[in-house]
Amino acid sequence: MVLPEFNKAGDLPPGVYQATLDETVERFGAARGRRNICTRRLLHVYALAQRTGHLYGASIFWVRPGLLVSESIEDFVAYWQIKRDGSKRGIVEVIP
């Protein structure tokens, strides 16, 4: 799937978009700075998930459905799409 273009605020349009790890790193990764740190962390989490088989379903927020106490994963994802100013942004789900 091709990720949509960023909007004027620099975000993906609201919604949940599926992309492979390679597509995600190509679109959001960077050689330096904070994005590089986040990219390395994402690659580390993904590698752990592949090696252990126990982190699949985890998000970059380190949440799995079984760890949510009083909300569904859909409610959690909907919450994280809301920005501080009340507008919404898109979220990427990394798929195998």
Image (spheres, rainbow, N blue to C red):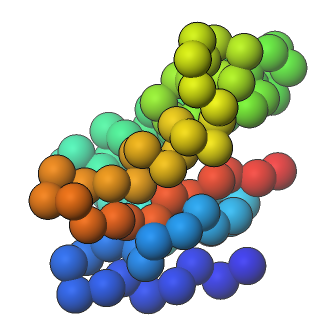
In this view, 4 is above or below 88: below
Residue 26 visible (yes or no): no
Number of on-image labels? 0
Q: Relative to 15, is 8 above or below?
A: below
Locate residue 88, reporting x and y percent: 34, 65
Can residue 11 be seen in this snapshot? yes
The quadrant the N terminus occupies is: bottom right
Residue drawn at point x = 43 percent, y = 78 percent:
13
Left or right: 48 with respect to 24? right
Residue 44 position in % (x across, y down): 56, 29
Depth check, front residue: 42 or 85: 85
Looking at the image, is 51 positioned above or below residue 14? above
| Furthest residue toward left | 85
Q: Is residue 62 left or right of residue 83?
A: right
Foreground of the two, 26 or 10: 10
Q: Residue furthest front?
A: 70
* Residue plotted at (65% across, 83% down): 2
Q: Residue 36: percent from the left, percent from the top?
A: 33, 47
Q: Is residue 7 left or right of residue 86?
A: right
Q: Quadrant of residue 8?
A: bottom left
Q: Quadrant of residue 45?
A: top right
Task: Check the image and report above or below for 34 versus 71.
Answer: below
The residue positioned 72% from the left and 15% from the top of the image is: 66
Q: What residue is at 26 percent from the left and 66 percent from the top?
A: 87
* Rendering coords of residue 29 (x, y %): 41, 58
